Image: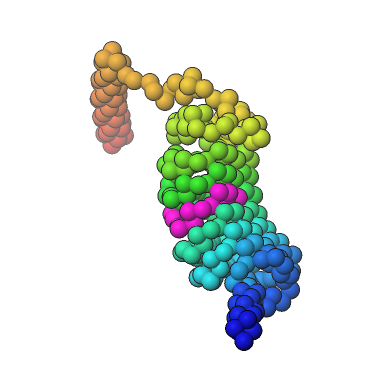
Amino acid sequence: MILGSFLVAVAMAFTGASASCPVLCTCHNQVVDCSGQRLFSVPPDLPLDTRNLSLAHNRIASIPPGYLTCYAELRVLDLRNNSLAELPTGLFLTAKRLVHLDLSYNNFSHVAADMFQEAHSLMRIDLSHNPWLRKVHPQAFRGLAQLRDLDLSYGGLSFLSLEALEGLPGLVTLQIGGNPWVCGCTMEPLLKWLRNRIQRCTSDSQLAECRAPPEVEGAPLFSLTEESFKACHLTLTLDDYLFIAFVGFVVSIASVATNFLLGITANCCHRWSKASEDEEI
């Protein structure tokens, strides 16, 4: 009787963990595959023990808040090639074991502050091929101490705040090629950090090019040296300030003289015109 009760309990537990597989999805060994089904919304009621969830190659435009609340075992979430422009706040609050997140080929325009809040186990984030991605908030990746691989390639980024990366002590690979980088003075701190902290992103370095300013357009990002940013550190000497003051003084005198001459000329013209009118009378 005891053995029978035990088997019933195990069977019930197994049934609860392996809830019915969503329509149009396949479920096997804690892997739920709903990819390529032309879904417009995420499937409800996944098996509670789901570890790998693929929603790739669909038409999903939004994810409801709290969608991942019941799936504490989730390790891999594949959302690539959808129509996502943002994620709900707190989506990963219970995803303590999530390791791999793929958001590539979507419509993100920015990565918000604390977008990955509480997903402390994340080791890889793929945000590549989001052509409208223009901004990454300085606090976007806060708390992701385990993150090793971050892919931001083939987006619309022209600038990336150093603060967004400084809090990632475990980062090994950073993919940033295929973006329209503006290699001005604001780029120098990021490049210095990359050389000191990242293993040169060898598979990506040739793809990271400057789009502006014109004098470095097309140049590989990692080809820029301290000499390239020399103009950013120019300082004025006392002679420079005296010269500027002198030029300003000369310009002021010239302006006054010009106005004086124009005034005399206008006055002469007025008198000549009046004299002409008197002669005609």
Relative vertical location of residue 75 with respect to residue 136 in this rendering, above or below: below
Q: Position of residue 171 (x, y in %)?
A: 52, 40
With 144 as the anchor, is 266 left or right in this view?
A: left
What residue is shown at x 62% (from left), y 63% (from top)?
51
What residue is shown at x 61% (from left), y 74% (from top)?
17
Return the residue nearer the eye: 8 or 46: 8
Q: Residue 116 lies in magenta, yes or no? A: yes
Quarter of the image with the N terminus in it = bottom right
Q: How is the image coloured?
A: rainbow
Q: Position of residue 104 (x, y in %)?
A: 63, 53
Relative vertical location of residue 189 with respect to residue 74 in this rendering, above or below: above
Chief secondary structure of the magenta span?
loop
Residue 130 visible: no
Quarter of the image with the C terminus in it = top left
With 202 as the anchor, is 64 left or right in this view?
A: left
Q: Position of residue 148 (x, y in %)?
A: 55, 43
Q: How many marks?
A: 0
Relative vertical location of residue 8 with respect to residue 216 in this rendering, above or below: below
What residue is shown at x 50% (from left), y 47% (from top)?
146
What residue is shown at x 53% (from left), y 36% (from top)?
182
Residue at the outermost bottom position: 1
Chain part drawn in magenta:
112-127
Residue 42 visible: yes
Instruction: Name the image quarter holding residue 261.
Output: top left
Instruction: Name the image quarter holding residue 38.
Output: bottom right
Return the residue nearer the eye: 192 or 154: 192
Q: Position of residue 178 (x, y in %)?
A: 63, 40
Q: Residue 265 lies in magenta, yes or no? A: no
Return the residue nearer the eye: 47 or 198: 47
Residue at the outermost top position: 239
